[in-house]
Amino acid sequence: MIQLKNIDKVYRTSSIETLALQNINLEIDEGAFLSVMGPSGSGKSTLLNIMGLLDAPTKGSVELAGQAVANMDDRAMARLRNRRVGFVFQSYHLINDLSVVDNVELPLLYRRMSSSERRKKSLSALEKVGLTARTRHFPTQLSGGQCQRVAIARAIVGEPNIILADEPTGNLDSVMSDEIMDILANLNQHERTTIVMVTHNQELANRTQRVIRLHDGSQVA
């Protein structure tokens, strides 16, 4: 589902050059659930951004769902990302002025779809994360765990093959963290969604099928 070959990522300014990733080679099969671990600054989020086509490698090649992306223009890459990938972030990235269901609908606005179909899909996604009673609420009326559930619903509303989750439990207590992991595990087991999750929590990483470890931009395990 995801293939990275000889990936380097270098960030340059006028006075400094930072090697964020070095010689990453990684194959992730369809239906896999893996976690990425490593100290702060080891390149975890950079790796996730390259997988999700939010950033381009300085060197190396990326294939997503069998498609090489090197020669894609921005529009084609955005279309592939919108249809294949759902993102979940530590800080939720919800829009406070929009209701829960309107937040979930956002990725569907870029597809040719009627408003009634968008609403139907959004309500179905919210049902999967247990928030059917909160569709008309606003993010400021929800707990952190509920906000993250909304973010997961938004990530899955377009029925992506891949979910990339960057510290999805980082702002949550242990009970809420377990609930979020249960939702991700259910998506993986019952819908064959491929999930890559960045985490600092070893207990949560132990619940995934595979652990990738980074140190100073290199894969060490």
Image (cartoon, rainbow, N blue to C red):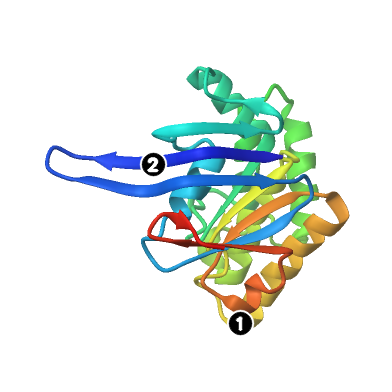
Residue name at image x 46 percent, y 45 percent: 23
Figure quadrant of the N terminus: top right
Give the percent coordinates (x, y) of residue 190: 87, 55
Residue 47 shown left or right of residue 114 in the figure: left
Residue name at image x 44 percent, y 37 percent: 55
Above or below for 182 versus 21: below
Residue name at image x 77 percent, y 45 percent: 30
Give the percent coordinates (x, y) of residue 89: 52, 56
Residue 122 shown left or right of residue 168 in the figure: right
The image quarter containing residue 159 is top right
Toward the viewer: 146 or 213?
213
Q: Residue furthest bottom?
A: 174
**SS type, badge 1:** helix
Residue type pointed to by label 1: Ser
**SS type, badge 2:** strand
Residue name at image x 36 percent, y 49 percent: 20
Give the percent coordinates (x, y) of residue 60: 48, 33
Residue type pointed to by label 2: Lys
Toward the viewer: 68 or 100?
68
The image quarter containing residue 183 is bottom right
Sequence-earlier tag: 2 or 1:
2
Give the percent coordinates (x, y) of residue 185: 77, 63
Dot 2 surroundings within 10 Å: few (below 14), some, or many (20 or more)? many
Figure quadrant of the C terminus: bottom right
Circle on res. 174? 1
Q: Nearer the viewer, mark 2 or mark 1?
A: 2
Answer whether residue 52 is visible to the viewer in this image: no
Toward the viewer: 122 or 137?
122
Above or below for 77 versus 26: above
Toward the viewer: 120 or 42?
42
Dot 1 surroundings within 10 Å: few (below 14), some, or many (20 or more)? few
- Disc 2 target residue: 9
